[in-house]
Image (cartoon, grey):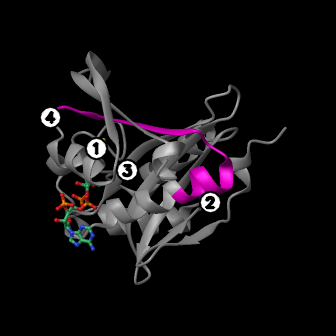
Amino acid sequence: MRNPIKTLPRQIKTERLELRQLDANIENATLIFNAIKDENPKDFYFNPIVDTDIIPTSSQQMLQQMKLEEEFIRLNGVIFYVFYNNDLIGYKRLYFNNEDVRMTLQSSNIWLKKSAWGHGFSQEINKKIDEIAFTQLGAKRITTQCSTENTRSAKSLESSGFHLDGIARGGGFLPDGTVYDNMFWSKLESEYLGE
Ligand SMILES: CC(C)(COP(=O)(O)OP(=O)(O)OC[C@H]1O[C@@H](n2cnc3c(N)ncnc32)[C@H](O)[C@@H]1OP(=O)(O)O)[C@@H](O)C(=O)NCCC(=O)NCCS
């Protein structure tokens, strides 16, 4: 049976943003590349946009990454690009595990352009993901992770109502092989429903 995450609309509106699924083609790769090419790699250390350089160095490299990620999400995932006033400002990846009773939405990678930090956009996206998970997909829990050193991400998850389940020492690694302590967060359906 088809995973329900694969039936989500291609465009979803939040209060201020639009989340859009984009096909892997050179037009979209160029759009993304132009939006992020001047970002500082240091700001994306914990969430590299491409494995080798953190920030892509060409539209072609961005297209290769999009094609790779299309494979990752083929059966049970979705990638939304984040638009504000029609400008591309970010990225969010989700997976849905509907094969056991826990029915878990794994809220994976997120990045926003530096100029879009500090406006509550990450929290706004998380709010919409809660709604999708618990009212549309039938998820029982949402999980997510971040490095203990990524204080901005941890703060955002806490403000989004996630519960810190624990820290897996040496539980995460970056494409360059750097190992980090990984914070594991969750949110339950009962918490969303206020039970
Ligand atoms: C992680 C990341 C997405 C967080 O973005 P962010 O903008 O800091 O996150 P938030 O949405 O939580 O917003 C932060 C602050 O905006 C402010 N804000 C302004 N307007 C707001 C609004 N309307 N609603 C809520 N907060 C608002 C608040 O002060 C909020 O912090 P607080 O709730 O703790 O007071 C961003 O830092 C990023 O892209 N980092 C690089 C990639 C990365 O590391 N990704 C995570 C990998 S695990």
Q: Which residue has dot 4 on it?
A: 149
Sequence-first disc among 3 and 1: 1
Residues at marks 3 and 2 touching, judged by CB atoms closer than 8 Å: no
| Front residue of 170 and 21 | 170
* Residues at marks 3 and 1 touching, judged by CB atoms closer than 8 Å: no
Mark 2 Cβ and ligand 1 under 8 Å apart: no
Looking at the rendered structure, the kind of residue marked 4 is Glu
Q: Quadrant of ligand 1?
A: bottom left
Q: Tell me the kind of residue under disc 2.
A: Asp
How far across and down, in percent of the image, does residue 86 sit?
A: 44, 81
Q: Which mark is residue 110?
A: 3
Q: Mark 2 points at which residue?
A: 23
Magenta-tinted stretch: 131-148
Q: Residue 91: give x, y in percent of width and height.
A: 42, 57
Mark 3 lies within 8 Å of ligand 1 (Cβ measured): yes
Distance in Å between CA atoms under marks 1 and 2: 21 Å
Image quadrant assignment for residue 181: top left
Of marks 4 and 2, which one's residue comes earlier in the chain? 2
Q: Is residue 63 magenta?
A: no
